Image: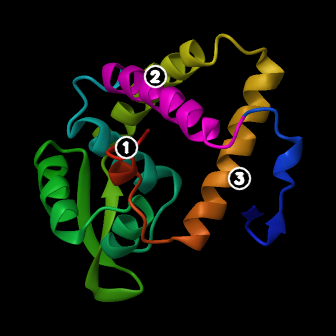
Amino acid sequence: MAAGNRTVDTTTISAPPGDLGWHLGMVLRGYQSRFEEAVEGMPGGIRGFQILSAVIHRDPANQQALGAHLGIDRTVLTYLLDGLEQDGVVERVPAPSDRRARKVVPTDHGRELLTRYEQRVGAAESTLLAGLTPEEAKILVSLVGRLAMDVHRAQPGSNPCEAMDHLP
């Protein structure tokens, strides 16, 4: 099985083929329910949190780059940004690299909100990972992050939200 440009010998994996999808689905469902609870009250809900987090931590060059990173259609993103802007969480300003494009920037209120909600999301993630040792949790998060980036590079337009609809 290819992973990026490497090959993994699946004969050394102890679970039968197909179990990985079930396991990932269960973890994702557990994460989703905890995540939804943690961002309750956040303007824009889960999507609002993801947008604000990407704007602050990834600093995308413009609105189009933000949508591409999050896998959100531009018309949907515009609608979400309108709401976040109305709630005083973000602003759209001319992008420095292209004055015709818009860059999404956080407001001070948006930065304060993200700090508060990141603490809540962090606590929810800790609860999900409570069955692992701290070292195991750190390794899992690192490995899942690497796999996610491999998939993102191979399928840059894929939408993780759509994948949820097709879990086993």
User: Does dot 3 land on a helix, a strand or a loop?
Assistant: helix
- Local crowd size for mark 2, using a 10 Å CA cut-off: few (<14), some (14–19), many (≥20): some
Q: Is residue 42 magenta?
A: no
The residue beneath circle 2 is 30
x, y percentage for residue 113? 34, 32
Q: Main secondary structure of the magenta part?
A: helix
Q: Name the side, left or right, on which 109 lies relative to 1.
A: left
Q: Which residues are magenta?
A: 16-37
Q: Nearer the viewer, mark 1 or mark 3?
A: 1
Residue at x 68%, y 11% (from the top left corner):
131
Q: Amino acid at mark 1?
A: Met
Determine which quarter of the picture holds residue 151. Answer: bottom right
Looking at the rendered structure, the secondary structure element under dot 2 is helix
In the displayed structure, 66 sits above or below 89; it is below
Q: What whole-number distance in Å separates the C-alpha atoms at marks 1 and 2?
A: 12 Å
Q: Residues within 10 Å of mark 3 (few under 14, many from 20)?
A: few
